[in-house]
Amino acid sequence: MADMRRVFVGFVVAAAMSLGHVPDGWPGEPGQGTPPRSGDSFRRQLLTPATVTWTQNPLRDALGELSRQGSIAVWLDRRVDPDQRVDFVSPRDATLDALLHDLARHIGLGVAYVDSVVYVGPTETASVLATVAEARLDAARRDRLAFLSRKAPLSWPELTEPRSLLARIADGNAFAWSNLDEVPHDLWPAADWPAIPRTHQLTLLLAGFDRSFEWTSASQTLRIVPVPRIERIERNYGMRGDSGEKLAELRRRFPGAELTPSGARLRAVASAEDHFWIQRTLQGLPSLAPRGDTPREVRYTLRTTAPFGGLAKAIADRLELQLDIDPRLESQSARNVMLDVKEVTRDELLRILADAVGATYEVRDGTLIIRPR
């Protein structure tokens, strides 16, 4: 029987997919022989609808489910407890991109898209990681270090030691580490990443140690160093059509970017993630909606059987409400209840939840109160 702690609500990817058992292990391997998405396929996947409900689900399983269902590589920072329990409900209208960021905020973490790998880890690291990787790639191209700038897939088996993995990458690409002994001993679960630049691979692998790497010009020797605070990089783009209208749209979508037009050219100083979506917007391709935008009326679709207490807590958390269950309903907390609703409003969802145990509810001063009839 499926683990009833895990309850999915219509996770939609490119095509309908059935849910299966998530094996114990670290997220990062799409599995089942499906290669992880990369490039534009990866970015398009981030814009597909994704709706989930989890009750006391281990973070490892939750991210592993997203990885398998979307055929995307997800890398969880080693400093994050993979067994922490997650109660989380996402709006029906969320994209995979919005879901990932919402989930990360819910548990006090951050998300970064390092080329075609989703990184989940401490917010301070996530806020700069993709930009650091792109800055390293720019430098490698400038110094003509093809062993760092070329793209390649990367995978490793269960119980791989990170120092050995970094040494293997060096041996296979004719470079050396000057201080690899600074990487402490650890054992990592198996992972499978798509083809991304070596600069990005090394940035991801060292991130969990709060480390990055550098080199002297045209050197074949790399040195491990603290992660630099590189928050923005410069790019130049061509603009076609109504440049004034396009510039206004970009400034609305990416308020953190410094955008300077010059004729048919646009100079942009922004994070690596913003740069990718800016480029897609200028090319007329589907792009990211501002994450601050929310539907006027969120509706919920939910089909699950779970303990009433845990389910009520997950729903209250998603609605950003405190939960107050009357002590007289204590005996109902462990009782499995079934909810099967489609496109209901918040009030309809809460009424059906309370009805499941013969109770009533009200929302007052930011608190969901459930009491006996």
Image: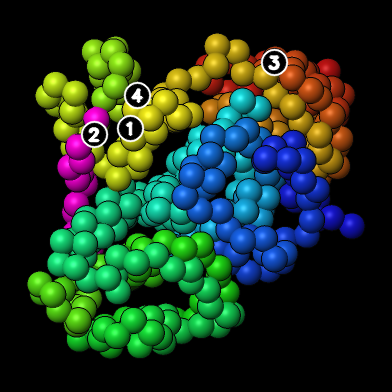
Residue 253's tag is 4
Q: Earlier in the sequence, mark 3 or mark 2?
A: 2
Q: Quadrant of residue 121?
A: bottom left
Q: Earlier in the sequence, mark 3 or mark 4?
A: 4
Q: Earlier in the sequence, mark 1 or mark 3?
A: 1
Region in magenta: 226-238
Q: Distance between the residues labelled 2 and 4?
A: 17 Å
Apparent side of residue 237 relative to residue 292 in the rendered image (left or right)? left
In the image, 147 versus 312, the foreground residue is 147
In this rendering, which labeled residue sits more in front, label 1 or label 2?
Answer: 2
Q: Is mark 3 on a helix, strand or loop?
A: loop
Q: Earlier in the sequence, mark 4 or mark 1?
A: 4
Q: How far apart are marks 3 and 2 (CA)?
A: 43 Å
Q: Residue at x 34, y 24 (%)?
A: 253
Q: How crowded is mark 1: few (under 14 residues within 10 Å), some or many (20 or more)?
A: many
Which amino acid type is shown beneath numbered disc 3?
Thr
Apparent side of residue 185 relative to residue 128 in the rendered image (left or right)? right
Location of mark 3 (residue): 345
Which amino acid type is shown beneath numbered disc 4?
Arg
Q: Which colour scheme is used?
A: rainbow
Q: Are the two marked residues, 1 and 2, in contact with CB atoms closer than 8 angstroms?
A: yes
Q: How far apart are marks 4 and 1 (CA)?
A: 9 Å
Which amino acid type is shown beneath numbered disc 1?
Ile
Location of mark 2 (residue): 237
Task: Please indicate, yes or no, whether residue 255 appears anywhere in the rendered image.
Answer: no
Which amino acid type is shown beneath numbered disc 2?
Tyr
Residue 145's tag is none
Whether 220 is drawn above or below 139: the answer is below
In this rendering, which labeled residue sits more in front, label 2 or label 4?
Answer: 2
